Image (spheres, rainbow, N blue to C red):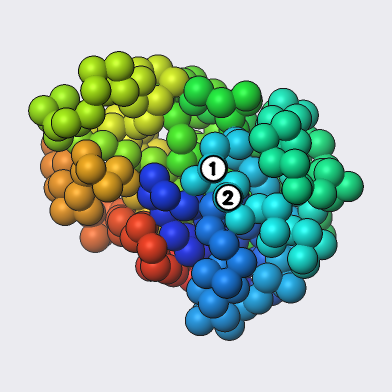
Amino acid sequence: MLRVFTLYSGSSANCTVIDIDGRVILVDAGGGVKKTQKALESVGLSLSAVEAVFVTHEHSDHVAGLSTICKHFRIPIISNEATLDALSRENGDIDTSLFCPMPSGACARRDCFEVTSFHSSHDSAECVGYRIKTAHGDVGVCTDAGEVTPEIRTSLCGCKTVVLESNHDKNMLFTGPYPYRLKQRISGPFGHLSNEQCAELLSTLVSRGAENVLLAHLSKDNNTPETALSTVGSFLSVHNIKVGSDVNIFVAPRSEISHIYTYN
């Protein structure tokens, strides 16, 4: 059985769970131990069952709980050297003996799954997304990207399940109260994907086999779940893709467990 879901997702904390026949990995750990453990227990899992945390990048909303969680449960921390170095510099309490360097583009192989990283366009040391190959179909996770690069598109094509950033509505961002420089950073090539950028990429991914999608990392101030779903759905409809029949799409909530995609 394969289960894919987020424990929480947004500008405050992010964590994606991939449960492969009881073999559990996390992508990022932006919430505290108690919050994360309680959420996992609500779906019959535990931090003690987590085999590894694959880190996308060092920003706090993705790693705030990483040090404590991994130290307490002795969970390996996997990412590229640049990200691990940044984690070490910015968090003196992190247990570097748990670090497992994995070059961007490399593949970590286990009994029943493989995890391959790919570069993402974001203003961190070396941000990546992940593609997880399983017997129940591939899972793609890309939650921070300023633009859809050819590498991102290629890496996610063929994934059955996709957790993809749909961070902001452009109109809400540019008419909102954020300083001009921050607006430029968010909308720039090393910032975050807009609803429109997410929708454009999804039109490709659905045509290449994507069946189930979680819209992730929504901005609290510059987006709403309804806006994200409407924008993505309208764009896909123009391209003759119907949400609910051709593809299932749910929004990953900010502080609770998302819809769980399950494959037997």
In the figure, 164 relative to 252: above or below? above
Residue 105 picture location, percent across and down: 70, 29
Q: Nearer the viewer, residue 31 or 249?
A: 31
Q: From mark 2 to mark 1, how far is it between C-alphas? A: 5 Å
Mark linked to residue 60: 1
Q: Nearer the viewer, residue 92 or 147?
A: 92
Q: Quadrant of the C terminus?
A: bottom right
Mark linked to residue 64: 2
Q: Residue at x 49, y 25 (%)?
A: 122
- The answer to whether residue 215 is seen in the rendering is yes
In the figure, 122 relative to 140: above or below? above
- The answer to whether residue 80 is seen in the rendering is no
**Residue lying farthest front?**
92
Which element type, helix, strand or loop, lies under badge 1? helix
Residue 33 picture location, percent across and down: 61, 67
Q: Nearer the viewer, residue 79 or 38?
A: 38
Q: Residue at x 76, y 47 (%)?
A: 94
Residue 180 picture location, percent across and down: 23, 18
184 vs 172, left or right, is right
Q: Residue at x 78, y 59 (%)?
A: 71
Q: Nearer the viewer, residue 31 or 107?
A: 31
